[in-house]
Image (cartoon, rainbow, N blue to C red):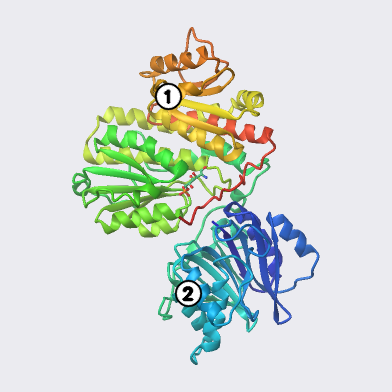
Amino acid sequence: MCGIVGYIGKQKATPILINGLLSLEYRGYDSSGLAVIENNSIAILKDKGRVSNLEELTKNCELTSHIGIAHTRWATHGKPSKENAHPHLDNSEQFVVVHNGIIENYHELREFLTQKGYHFLSQTDTEVIPNLIHYYYSNGIADEDPFLRAVKSAVDDLKGSYAIEVISKLYPDKMIVVRKDSPLVIGKGNGENFVASDIPAILSYTKDFYLLDDNEYAVLSADTIHFYDNTLSEHSKAIKNIEWDATAAEKNGYEDYMLKEIYEQPNAIRETIGSHFTLGEKCSFDDLSIEKDYLSTINKIFIVACGTAMHAGLVGKNAMEKLCHIPTEVDIASEFRYRDPIIDEKTLCIYISQSGETADTIAALKLAKSKGAKTLAVSNVIGSSITREADYTIYTHAGPEIAVASTKAYTSQVVLMVILAIYFAETLNSCDTSELESLKSDILDLPSKLEAVLDETRTIERFAKKIYTEHDMYFLGRGSDYYVAMEGSLKLKEISYIHSEAYAAGELKHGPIALIENGVTVISILTNPNLVEKCISNIQEVITRGAKTLVITNQKLHNVHFDFVVNIPETNSFISPILSVVPLQLLSYYIAKNKGLDVDKPRNLAKSVTVE
Ligand code: AGP
């Protein structure tokens, strides 16, 4: 939910910290700050608002330090303000900390420290951490590494989730980091090392990464990185080379990341299809060894995720049920984890998460594992937390997604779920080969069809101009079109702050039609030939009541007048959401632009929701 960066090396730390924070700003942007060790004391700069405010502050002071930590915040405990912004110091100003996550027992710890004479300057849960470190450092037993020992003792007291960076003016050449249920990566350079919540933040400096595990400590100097488990016994760790291109995480001439990512969809789909199949050959997943013997025992699939990823799961459910004949349910992770779902070893639980760090999704995965089910993660981030928890992992290859509103990750998730369903169906012999081959052929045509949809951008832009001042909109569809309506409605809320609802078109008469009055905008998705007539009747009902209509369709519609029609290419109905969602992504984008909003960083939202 927040983003952290760290640097230790030979260069000036401040510009590297600011660069890192700018690329992590999608994780939180209500305040930011940094701490460096300057002339044997800790210098802190922080401010409310965007990282650009902090950047301005750095221009007014000459910071030359080669070690520093930094943070961009998305408030959980304590309002967005300068005093609540990280980094936080201990009372003696010897230790300074940035933290991502939530300390659940901070009231208790604050109470304990207050009794010991400590005082607090912020309302944050984080401020207990540097003070605990100081407490253990000053009361600690003799140890060959008292700094590390004090950090470990403090961390032992914490309940909750955390990624923590600590530096101390007593140890100006050392940085300690630790994580639990919150992401943290270490980038290895030449005579310098980097820390970040997410790979793109430091990708322009190195491609060699260590992915820190839960309850693992790393102690960094400019030239070394030592890893310790939670008993502080040292171990070695494998390095990972990340192939992402740093420029892929930049805007490449687009006005916003979201627009860039919308336009990257043909390629993201191409990459995600990758080499999973060619026509006439069975689907394969290199790292997925799910045997027929196991798959035949599965009598239930749960697909669990949050937000847009959950919408991708709904589309995936259709393919799973129809191609594999396995009953499939889709759950919201935050509900699933607390509703005591019926799960056993005959259940397969699939978790979809772009970031692989969503707290509820990870908790829902751990729950299923504890009940004996096998778990499969679908993620876009190699080595992310969810992939390390799951029994099996498959990856979308959408490349880094920076805009808070998910676009290319969604379409990549949908295509991968459908390919997975084909793979299962081929393993189980549950579906006619010619049907699967025809679906595969349609999947291979998706990138060029997506390019054709993107050519319709101007029509959407015109429609957006007409409706951007409205306050309520409705999205309708049946079957998979309804799932796309849900995604379209979420996108609109997220980035244009317009209230909207998605309804299964058949539900209209059961209540929502009461909301339709003159001039209200109703957006409908019509791609399933078997359901088109029924859906048109529903749209007629809203037209009669004065609604303005936008229809997204791959069908020839006669004898009905809609205000705007966006034609998209025909394709198999399992994958039509990949095409029909694009005009809706563009619509919310252009509405937000017309309203002058920051589309990449919508208010109150963060890209990775790493807290409950
Ligand atoms: C998408 O536009 C949203 N920002 C959000 O719903 C997102 O899909 C959700 O938080 C899940 O994230 P994940 O895929 O990283 O788990």
Would residue 56 appear left or right of 532 to someone viewing this image? right
Residue 453: x and y in percent read 54, 27
Nearer to us of marks 2 and 1 is 1
The residue that appears at 63% across and 41% down in the rendered structure is 599
Q: Considering only vertical position in the picture, is 287 above or below 466?
A: below
Specify the label residue 272 is tagged with: none
Q: Of residues 579 and 534, which is closer to you in this image?
A: 534
Residue at which label 1 appears = 511
**Numbered disc 2: secondary structure:** helix
Pick the front one: 368 or 219: 368
- Quarter of the figure with residue 421: top left
Q: Report if residue 281 is visible in the image.
A: no
Q: Position of residue 280 (x, y in %)?
A: 32, 33
Q: Is residue 49 left or right of residue 354?
A: right
How many neighbours does mark 1 have within 10 angstroms: few (below 14), some (14-19), or many (20 or more)? few
Work out which quarter of the rendered image holds the C terminus and state it: bottom left
Mark 2 nearby-residue class (10 Å; few <14, some 14–19, many ≥20): many
At horizontal 28% and vertical 59% (from top left) the residue drawn is 370
Q: Which residue is mark 2?
A: 155
Residue at screen point 52% across, 64% down: 185
352 lies left or right of 138? left
User: x, y percentage for residue 163?
Assistant: 51, 66
